[in-house]
Image: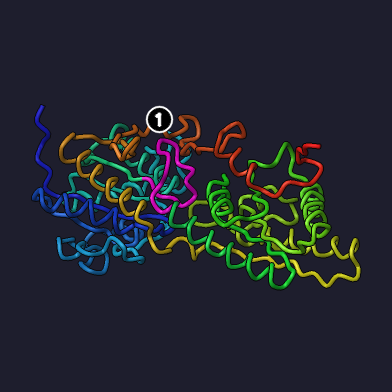
Amino acid sequence: MEVPKIKHIGILFSGGPAPAANAVISATVMNLVNAGVEVYGFLQGFEFLQEYEEGKTLAPNEHYKILTLPDVSGIRNIKSIIIKTSRANPGKGISSIHDLTNPEKNHRLLNVYKWMDHFEIDGLITIGGDDTLKTVNYLYLMQYHVPDIRPMRIVHIPKTIDNDYLGIDWTFGYTSAANFAAHEIRNLGADAASTNSWFILEIMGRKTGWLTYAAGIAGEAVRMISVENIKGDFNLDRLVADLLALMVARTNEGKKYGVICVSEGLAELLPENLRPTRVDRHGNVVLGDAEVGKVIANELETRYKEIFPKEALKVRAKQIGYETRCAEPAAFDVMLGSQLGVGAFRAICQKGFSGVMVSVEDQMQIKYVPFHELIDPKTLLAKIRYIHKNSDFYQLARSLEYQLPENRITHE
């Protein structure tokens, strides 16, 4: 079956930045343009597409840009996203299939379709995280539930430095972000060893510890803690007591220093009075506001001084967050991002696919995962890929941490 000719494609980037973002954009656009397709780069994600007013139009180079080969040549390693991004959320307020036909809730999504019709867009390629996947799934489903919508193919490319996307083993930018955070850990580790002090380093990771563990392993942190470490209800006092035991054991061995990595996702498990309350445009709590690393650091310093009152030991907290999102892209991420871009082109122009996420397996072999396998049918939220405690990756992190003397096997 011959795939109908595609003339105009839209591409946008939504949510937080990630290293190698431009590699994705470059590969996608190069393949599209070389196939004779006109590419509309919609600037700042859904920011301008979610608003529509009859008689008004979007301005070229302000709201969108026709992307050409010169625009995307030599940009794979540039850090800032050439089509920019935002957290605009046209799916805000949608929580069920029925909401997709409710004019009070679907108007922003309909506005996106109005602009797609205005520009005669045949297919939309989105690059973004799980919230963006949720939104584009709404757009995809609307074609089956809302009459008189201009049909278009919709393909999504997964993006998150958290690496917790279902349907793909490694997301572009993850390795680069881990490299950057690991470098920070090594620097702080040298500082800690020089000054006999401790650092509690808070690293991005809302639901999982993929980034915290990778950075901790590569940076040689003495302990890595994420939501996966917590058994049952989160007990801050118990966690602090465990870390204090680690610090005391190292002190007794003559090592009054170290770096402990904690995932920002622990903030959602804090006692009610310590949890952050501010939310972003997707309704996600802004975890950095809680400064969970600082909470832990303050408790540790106080309790350590109760045991060693004559010691002037400092426990400092530091957040590593936005710095990782536009870190220097690693070669692996540039290759991965480029292949995902090629996969998006093939999906829309060669295979006629829609409602799929681009993924890879084995040696960068492209594959496609239908949205319905990635979305919870009841909540319409994207499913999360957790680190299971019986996984080798989880066990790797545990095996490389500092072990308390009583947990070590000795041979007499």
For the point 55% across and 39% down, the residue is 393
Q: Specify the quadrant that holds the C terminus.
A: top right
Which quadrant would residue 94 be assigned to in this image?
top left
Pointer 1 local density, CA inside 10 Å: few below 14, some 14–19, many at least 20: some
Query: Which residue is painted at 18% across and 34% down in the image?
Result: 351
- The residue depicted at 29 percent of the width and 37 percent of the height is 365
Residue 243 in picture, x, y percent from top left: 77, 52
Q: Which is more toward the observer, 355 or 116?
A: 355
Q: Quadrant of the N terminus?
A: top left
Pointer 1 residue: 373
Q: Give the range drawn in magenta.
A: 158-174
The residue lying furthest to the top in this view is 1
318 over 29 or under it: above or below: below
Q: Is residue 212 left or right of residue 273?
A: left
Q: Which amino acid does label 1 sit on?
A: Glu
* Image vertical order of residue 352 relative to residue 58, above or below: above
Task: Please tell me whether the stretch drawn in magenta is mainly helix, strand or loop.
Answer: loop
Residue 311 rendering spot, x and y as whole percentages: 86, 70
Colour approach in the figure: rainbow
Q: For residue 253, say whether it is visible.
A: yes
Label 1 secondary element = helix
* Residue 323 percent coordinates (x, y): 49, 65
Q: Nearer the viewer, residue 324 or 104?
A: 324
- The percent position of residue 248, horizontal first and vertical second, equals 82, 56
Q: Is residue 375 magenta?
A: no
